[in-house]
Amino acid sequence: MRLAFMGTPEFAVPSLAELIASGHEVVAVWSQPPRPKGRGQTLKPSPVQAFAETMGLPVFTPESMKTPEAIEAFRGLEVDAACVVAYGQILKREVLEAPRLGCFNLHGSLLPRWRGAAPIQRAIIAGDRQTGVQIMRMSEGMDEGPILLSEVLDIRPDDTAASLSDRMAVTGASLWPRALAAIERGGATETEQAGEPTYARKITPAEARIDWSRSAAQIDAHVRGLSPFPGAWFAGPDGARIKALMSAVVSGAGAPGQVLNGDGLVVACGEGAVRLSRVQREGKAAQADVEMLRGYPIAPGVVMG
């Protein structure tokens, strides 16, 4: 098939690679524009743009897909279908109707649960035991289109947003050849979403701070769901911000935020305790909790901010 691909983050790269390997003609790629990164704030292309360029594919990076120029550029390629994976822009009806067979999106949840921008993070934070990847026909509503293919994945007790995203990206990519074959022969079964939707709003910096009054299970899910970015954080004894990148529920009790005796950095919660096994101080590299405590000792009894 003659395809357009639209995607931006690392999550989308396996899908683009799978489409190319499957023998489809990817005529062009759309991605978000390069953004400033790092200390020097140098403009860097998205992971999808970087990969597409190594494969010799033309890449379009408009600030908006709503302008007449962007819409006409998309229409002009006369593709059979568009494959969309975490592109990051809302597509107007003119774009959705431009491909001969339609636009299709790979979404990282079991819809209608977790429609929106951050389904992987929200599933972990909410304590969900399962999630999935689905290919859906796109409509003008946010993640409201009918489902063509689904694959369920378990959320492991030690999953972070990064580890779960990696597994979902590979599993999701593997769905594209089957979905496109069914679409091309006109045999795709499209199932309308059923049930009450929930919404995966974008993660904000304000919600990253750890609230020690919550239960250990809630804090553990919060830490893992925000790891590695933006990173759940707390204030150390000197007020320095410390990110918690990995955690586990452990036995223990004390005042919320109180450091307890034990192996590594064990902190009491509103109910139970967590061990923050991987941490990152401001301006420092991520490290194991026991390593941080050697150079930044925190005595049992200290209450974290």
Image: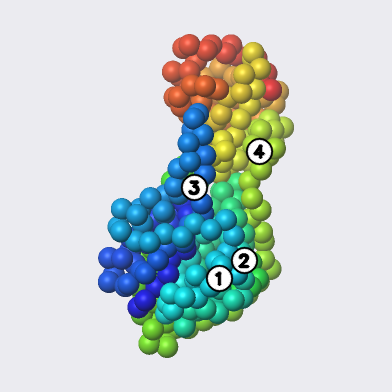
**Residue that badge 1 annotates:** 71
Q: Which mark is residue 205?
A: 4
Mark 3 surroundings within 10 Å by alpha-carbon count, few (fewer than 14), some (14 through 19), many (20 or more): some
Image quadrant assignment for residue 90: bottom right
Q: Residue at x 65, y 71 (%)?
A: 141
Q: Residue at x 65, y 33 (%)?
A: 210
Q: Residue at x 49, y 71 (%)?
A: 74
Q: Amino acid at mark 3?
A: Pro
Horizontal side, residue 175 vs residue 159: left or right: left
Q: Position of residue 39 (x, y in %)?
A: 50, 29
Mark 2 surroundings within 10 Å by alpha-carbon count, few (fewer than 14), some (14 through 19), many (20 or more): some
Circle 4 or circle 3, nearest the eye: 3
Distance from the alpha carbon under mark 2 to that under mark 1: 7 Å
Q: Amino acid at mark 2?
A: Lys
Q: Is residue 169 visible?
A: no
Extreme-front residue of the structure:
69
Q: Residue at x 55, y 22 (%)?
A: 282
Q: Position of residue 87 (x, y in %)?
A: 52, 59
Q: Amino acid at mark 1?
A: Ile
Distance from the alpha carbon under mark 1 to that under mark 3: 20 Å
Work out which quarter of the rendered image holds the N terminus and state it. Answer: bottom left
Q: Are marks 2 and 3 in contact (CB under 8 Å)?
A: no
Horizontal side, residue 286 vs residue 230: left or right: left
Q: Which mark is residue 34?
A: 3
First in residue order: circle 2 vs circle 3: 3
Q: Does 176 sit above or below residue 157? A: below
Distance from the alpha carbon under mark 4 to that under mark 2: 28 Å
Q: Is residue 200 visible?
A: yes
First in residue order: circle 2 vs circle 1: 2
Distance from the alpha carbon under mark 2 to that under mark 3: 18 Å
Q: Does 76 sit above or below residue 28? A: below
